[in-house]
Amino acid sequence: MNYQQSQLATIVFASFVSFVLFLSFHLARKTKSSSGYFAAGGKIHWGVNGIAFAGDYLSAASFLGIAGMIATAGYDGFLYSVGYLAGWIVALFVVAEPMKKLGKYTFADALDAKFNSKSIRLTAALSTLVVSVFYLIPQMVGAGILVTPLLGLAHHWGVILVGTIVIIIVATAGMTSTTWVQFIKGGMLLIFSTVLVVAVLARGLSTKPSTSEGLPYHDFVTLEASAGGDGKMILADNHYSAPESWRETPLGKAGFVQLMNDEGPSIWKVTDKGDGKLALDETLYETILGTPRYDGIKILYNGAPRDKGRFFQVGHMSEVVVDGKSVEKTGPLGPLEFLSVIRNSSIVCWDKKVIADGGDKHTIYYQTVTPGSLIMRPGIKFKVDEDRGATAMDKWNFVSLMMALFFGTAALPHILIRYYTVPNPAAARKSTIVAIAAIGFFYVLTLYMGLGAMVNGVIDITDNNMSAPLLAKSFGISLFAVISAIAFATVLGTVSGLIVAASGAVAHDIMNVFLDLKMTDTGQVLAGKVVAIIVGAIAIWLGIQYKGMNVSYLVGWAFAVAASANLPAIVMMLFWKRTTAKGVAASIIVGVLSSVGLILFSPDMYERYGWDKASAPFALNNPGVVSIPLSFLALVIVSLLTSRRRALTAADEALR
């Protein structure tokens, strides 16, 4: 993907960051106690807290990841929105008021309120750290993604920049500055996302996406080919043959090209004839769709400059159908009409194929013309329909992901601690209702942003996380500047909340309570700031390591760990009288170990290790369907055993 750095976007970004840092230093003067640092003194208004909830929850996964997934996988990407929102029902009816009544600073406060157990303190704190780290990864990946078009910096510098800013925010004023950053970011995200969606609807749909300067582009070129007399496939001997830039492009280095005809794309291996032309092996190297014929074949490869006009706008309408008739352009559309036209039309989508050549692996991108009716129903990413090749394991994978999203929301430590920032349980309930309204509205907007990116030729096929900002860029650099700055603020707000949760777990739960160091208020705050720096450094390193992965997909792992480690303990502690401290601790340990272990042995992680996905010992990519029941089971079994032992001990003492 070729990006052009925007000076205006850089100025807007720098202005926002400067304001956030000023706010942090200003509020730091008022934050001296541990209550102020970890819970903003419990004085935040429920309305402000509700929008801050939204600002905290609508992370890089929501704004960048979901929009990007919808842009490439259609309705399947929107299912993440459905799962994320549904989880708030659990938060509203199960968690909100009890958390406020039982806790003070951290998730462990509420969990340990009835037991006064050091084992709960330790395991809950460790769970908070693990979940926070898993959630930090996609946020930092998103930060690196944004900095490339904004500042022209490499991915790792973007991650370092965000990490440094967040560490300053948290290490100065803690939850107070974090709350106001999240409130401002949440409000701006809702307002300008609405502006972007209105612009998408006003533009309508067209078979000719904009080619104005400033838009991103991929320099793929279409060439004609013919069968040579020596049994080789030869590029047509015109001015496109073997340009010098071939040597410097990904496909040239890989030694592969894609062949396109009416039956779909395939991948062929390239050889250099030495006379300025390229030949393709007669034997098909690998087929993606169908069996290509020699006649009518076109070759896609990199190398043409944009000013020659031979580049692909990635993703656009191949046919627009209105009332049963094909049209070139619709004009402005209403929200429901926009979805209806897409469903009845066809879209040029993109997919990728990873192929191996000896010890090397190469990624080839190719076009697929997809009916809108398939895009607007599940099946492109999540194989749930048998007539589209779904297996039983595919269906279990989908169920496992939905379980993690639904049950994970109410168990995320950085979400739970927001209940301590309001004055009473009633305010906690009201702020949850405000959050549900704001988050639900935003997730409806993600559907239009994702589909808008899909049909307007703005997708970066090497990293779909940039779909929403690049869609904004198609409407002008001003909107792109604001949307990019908000996206960056989205990362700042969420990462700040995560680091506050992690620092509270270490300073308050482990050091002050578990180790019984009897720290003063000042000591707890200082310890929290040191932990914030350490966790921030770890987040920076992980954000660099996981470059290129869809951020919403990565967040699915964090939800799975939270749902497995934390939710069973919360639910059973509130609703089952026979729950014991050892049962809660066992539940957390089993939840963390089983979820993290199964993730590490999942097919997607095996692929990331460079190993064969099929050899992964755990066939699902999300562990929720296994790890959540295991955690519940561990709590029940251990609680029954320990409560029985406690009853026998009490009976023995009575006999004496």
Image: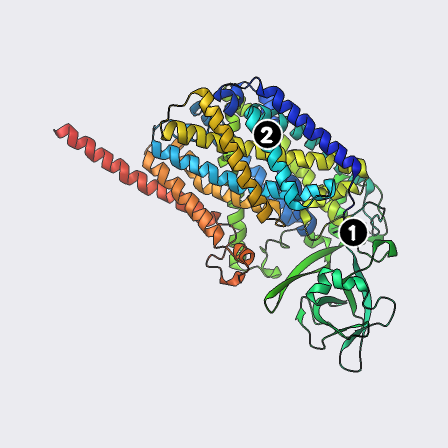
- Relative to 250, residue 171 above or below: above
Can you identify the residue that label 1 sits on?
217
**Mark whose residue sits in front, 2 or 1:** 2
Question: Which quadrant holds residue 114?
Answer: top left
Q: Amino acid at mark 2?
A: Ile
- Relative to 40, residue 463 above or below: below
Identify the image quadrant of the C terminus: top left
Percent x, y for residue 538?
53, 41
Q: Amino acid at mark 1?
A: Tyr
Q: Nearer the viewer, residue 92 or 20?
A: 20
Q: Nearer the viewer, residue 420 or 202?
A: 420
Question: Which quadrant holds residue 31?
Answer: top right
Percent x, y for residue 329?
85, 48
Circle nearer the N terminus (2, 1): 2
Which residue is rendered at x = 75% and y = 36% of the image? 10
Question: Mark 1: few, some, or many residues within 10 Å (few <14, many ≥20)?
Answer: many
Can you identify the residue that label 2 sits on?
168
Please, which residue is most extreme toward the bottom here? 230
Q: Secondary structure at mark 2?
A: helix
Which residue is rendered at x = 40% and y = 46% of the image? 630
Percent x, y for residue 372?
72, 53
